[in-house]
Image (cartoon, rainbow, N blue to C red):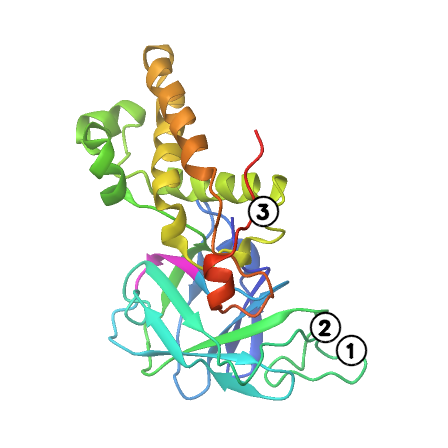
Amino acid sequence: MSVTNRVLFSDNGVLVDLTKDTNKFQSGTATIADYTAAQDYLYLGSMAPFNHFYVKMATASAVPASMTAEYWDGKSWIATYKLDDETSGLTASGFITMFPRRDNAWNVESTNDRGDQVTGLTTINVYDMYWMRLKLSADVPLGFAISWIGHKFSDDDDLASEFPDLVRAKMLLAYGTAKTSWEEQHAKAADLITQDLISSEVISWKGQILVRDEFTLASIQKVAELIFNALGDDYLDQRDRAQAEYKRRLDKSSYRIDANSNALLSPAEAVSRSGFMRR
């Protein structure tokens, strides 16, 4: 599940919509043939604030670069006070986590509507979104390709800590001849976790999840459940145990979610009782 609703690339001011391709985990690939640091941006639009997402690279950048992130406060682009870029400038797949400033709120904005203007987005019409833009510090003349932007709460290292047999080559090959990781299942697990939280009225929007580690243990069990279910009748007992443990781990008294929609975890939100999952 993508945390963003719109993904746009600005090629020297000319906007290219990458939304469709970056929302597809398996088949989507958004190619950027040439990136010029002095003029290009990657814009992310969302219906609500968010603070992290995962970028899966189809073709990684070959140029080391630092990344900066800015968000629109209603008047201008404001640099985040902190950015954790595990992609190292899109040279690898990884998480990007950013933190808005407390004294500059991230505000919802339309583009070219009722006199609203978002710098860099004046050639399109998009209503009521929160906008962020990413910029690299160096030119990437050979470009790069983004496969997917979305949510994940676990990876194969996490899975191996509880299900070491599942990450062995033999088990991967039993699932599919070209299978080398369970990355797709981790992404699907995040989608299902988010849907469960929404249906149980813990959250109303996926971007409210500010601390992804809060759901790593539940995600491990959901991934195992998905794998065992696909492997067939011989694994139904393991599937049922993983399913039961997933429900137990997700049933929490506090989820540390963004209740006030500012993409920052306040002390009150960190300890508040967010409600219980209903089964």
Which residue type carries mark 2? Asn
Measure the alpha-carbon separation of dots 1 and 2: 7 Å
Which residue type carries mark 1? Asp
Q: Secondary structure at mark 3?
A: loop
**Front residue of 248 and 97:** 248
Instruction: Return the x and y of residue 160 as percentages of the image width and height.
Output: 22, 37
Determine which residue is flagged by label 2: 125
Q: Residue at x 38, y 77 (%)?
A: 82
Determine which residue is flagged by label 3: 202
Instruction: Return the x and y of residue 158 as percentages of the image width and height.
Output: 26, 43
Q: Residue at x 37, y 34 (%)?
A: 223
Position of 113 with respect to 34 (left or right) is right
Determine which residue is flagged by label 1: 113
Residue 36, image quadrant: bottom left
Magenta residue span: 53-60
Q: Secondary structure at mark 1?
A: loop
